[in-house]
Image (cartoon, rainbow, N blue to C red):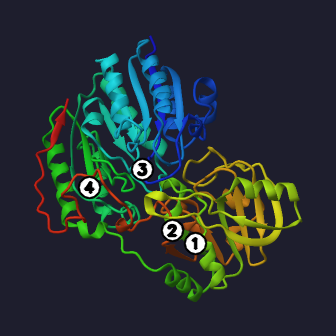
Amino acid sequence: MARRLVLAMMMHETNTFSPLATPIGSFGRASAFSGDSAIRELAGTNTPLGGFIDLAREAGAEFSVPMAASAHPSGLVTNAAFEEMAGAIVGEVVKGCDGVFLALHGAMVTESYDDGEGELLSRIRKAAPGVPIAIGLDFHTQLTAAMVDNATVIAGYRTYPHIDMAETSRRAGRTLLRALDGEVRPRMVWGKVPIMSSTLVHTPAREPMKTLMGMANEAEDSGLVLNASVFGGFPQADIPHLGLSALIVCDGSTSEGEILLNCILDTAWERREGFLFHPEPLHDQVARAKTLAGGPIILADHGDNTASGGTQDVMSVIAEAIRQGLTDVCAGPICDPPAVAKMIAAGVGAEVSLDLGGRIDMPALDLKGEPLRLTGRVRAITDGEFLVTGPMATGSKVRMGRTAVLDTGSMQIVVSEGRSEPYDLGIFTHCGIDPKAKRYVIIKSRQHFRAGFEPIARHIVMCDGDGCCASDLALLKYENIVRPLYPFDPDMVLRRNAPEEVT
């Protein structure tokens, strides 16, 4: 008989400093929530649930999808949203299955739980004590004991930008299928070091994370261990679970995994200074961009990026670019539904004057929204939908809501009703703008923009714009973190516990 599997996705990276609420309605961006519609939308895509769907089909398994929910990073997930998603998943598992494949983020914070994934897994384990569970996690996971204790296999992304989302699910799923066949006996060891690593400097493509991820990849790819993952963590969360962590899935004996784990974490601690971000004045960054030859020159506004919980309506970088006289610019998307409505009402070709962006205050950082008064012509109006063709989330559909382009003469600004991380050129090309032909491209992103935009960039300038995704930790008011924690306690002495083993 074919195995019966439960496949589900419940993904959210929670920025506890973000003013944006996260109700159940926020979780519809990646799929139609469940069943056949979710399978049709995500099968064959480079997404976490897409990887699990493809693997289940390859294995000839019967499977159901009780929940396929993914939301843009934002503030706390409401209790009602969490209960609806968790309830659907647990309810399907208790019907009986041979295994559970879960696409989770690893950094969900709800109104009641600072470890949303751990709470979900604890409920599943209580309802079905013996069911094997494989989990694919985001690179920015805040790993906790509740996650590890209640899982059978865990694998994390190896890349940032995340171009291996589907493959990560397949890595976790293949190990669980081998366990179901009796080929392997997964046992996990894990640990963490108290480093608050900036997401701007912890990508595995560059040091210091490159060496750590290289150790994990080599051990897994060579067969020394079943799976090996390193998690950078997510500093925009004021919770007790912060830190850089690693997890090794071993076959039976954990001795090799413990050696590898210790090597990864000790190396991370030795290189902890490399994980710090050093801010610069925004004026200087834009001025430096003006001195660069050729184009496109990407100006990445990392303080207000959607993929870390930003409002996507802060105008500080665009305003500075205008003050310094940058021309031949495309920018966006800016999330501003009233501005979109005004441009649609005016129609393509009409001249409009409007206050753009700056509609949302960020009290956690004492930031007031500051709209920017602009005049220009409406150059395009679209439904804001396009298929991703770049290497991140390939084949999935982006839904920005109604979208319009405001052309001020020196700058073409994409304005949308919804938020969307600009990791694919389709953000611009779907509304008639060719970013490859522009001298300057202003986008709100930390690292994901590199998936689609780095290949076309002549230069990249990181811009310290305002917003709740600020990389300067001094701007964030932490109340719930566990001390000592580097860099808040720069002279701390590391006293790390022995690796924790889970059978």
Residue at image position (62%, 45%) is: 395
Distance Cα–Cα, label 2 vs label 4: 36 Å
Residue 466 is tagged as: 2
The answer to whether the residue labelled 1 contacts the one labelled 4, judged by CB atoms less than 8 Å apart, is no
Distance Cα–Cα, label 2 vs label 1: 6 Å
Of labels 2 and 4, the one closer to you = 2
Q: Amino acid at mark 1?
A: Ser
Residue 16 is tagged as: 3
Percent position of residue 268, x then y? 23, 60
Look at the image and tell me in which quarter the C terminus lies: top left
Q: Quarter of the image holding residue 198?
A: bottom left
**Label 1: which residue?**
316
Residue at image position (58%, 57%) is: 360
The answer to whether the residue labelled 2 contacts the one labelled 1, judged by CB atoms less than 8 Å apart, is yes
Please tell me which of labels 2 and 3 falls first in the chain.
3
**Label 4: which residue?**
215
Front in this rendered view, residue 131 or 300: 300
Distance Cα–Cα, label 1 vs label 4: 40 Å
How many C-alpha atoms fall within 10 Å of the one at disc 2: few (<14), some, or many (≥20)? many
Q: Amino acid at mark 3?
A: Thr
- For the residue labelled by badge 4, is the local secondary structure a helix, a strand or a loop? helix
- For the residue labelled by badge 1, is the local secondary structure a helix, a strand or a loop? helix
